[in-house]
Image: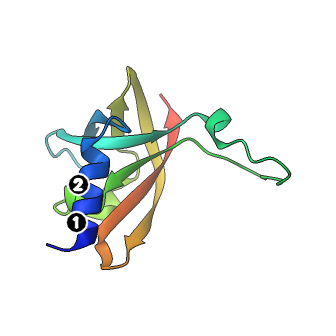
Amino acid sequence: MSIWDIHYAALYASPIAVDAVLTVACGDPPMALRAIDKTNPAALNFKGVDVLDIKPAAMVRAVDLAEVDPANLRNALIAFSGKTWTVKSHETVPAPTGEGYGEFRLILEAE
């Protein structure tokens, strides 16, 4: 176990993350996981910096999605904090130990 495994485990076990349910579009059963809610653009208020576009997003651990083909994330549904979102796109946010140990940023659209 690396220091990064400990870091991500603690981060996603903390109150920063919320319980979520992901349902991929290919028909696999829904999966419970933890997500970091990045849907509130007001939380991304950068003073003195022009931000062209901020899309609602959620961060999830790559290890939680190890059994999911990333191509199946498009049009998946993720529910957290009392709202359901459609995954429109995603990108990897690798850890220093590699992509498989980092996070996925899910770009969302309100249902």
User: Is residue 66 left or right of 106 when viewed as pictured?
Assistant: left
User: Mark 1 near mark 2, Cβ–Cβ under 8 Å?
Assistant: yes
Q: Nearer the viewer, residue 23 or 13?
A: 13
User: Is residue 87 left or right of 63 when viewed as pictured?
Assistant: right
Task: Give the color scheme: rainbow, by chain, secondary structure or one colour.
Answer: rainbow
Q: At which x and y percent is residue 23?
A: 26, 40
Above-or-below relation of 62 to 37: below
Q: Give the residue type at disc 2.
A: Ala
- Residue 24 visible in this rendered orientation of the protein: no
Quadrant of the snapshot with the N terminus:
bottom left
How far apart in space, not on screen, are marks 1 and 2 (Cα)?
A: 6 Å
Seen from this angle, which residue lies furthest top?
A: 82
Label of residue 91 in the image: none
Q: At which x and y percent is residue 93?
A: 43, 67
Q: Label 2 crowding class (10 Å Cα cut-off): few <14, some 14-19, many 20+?
A: few
Q: Please name the residue that numbered disc 1 is placed on.
A: 5
Q: Give the residue type at disc 1.
A: Asp
When asked about the image quadrant of residue 58, the answer is: top left
Q: At which x and y percent is residue 53?
A: 72, 50
Above-or-below relation of 8 to 85: below
Q: Please name the residue that numbered disc 2 is placed on.
A: 9
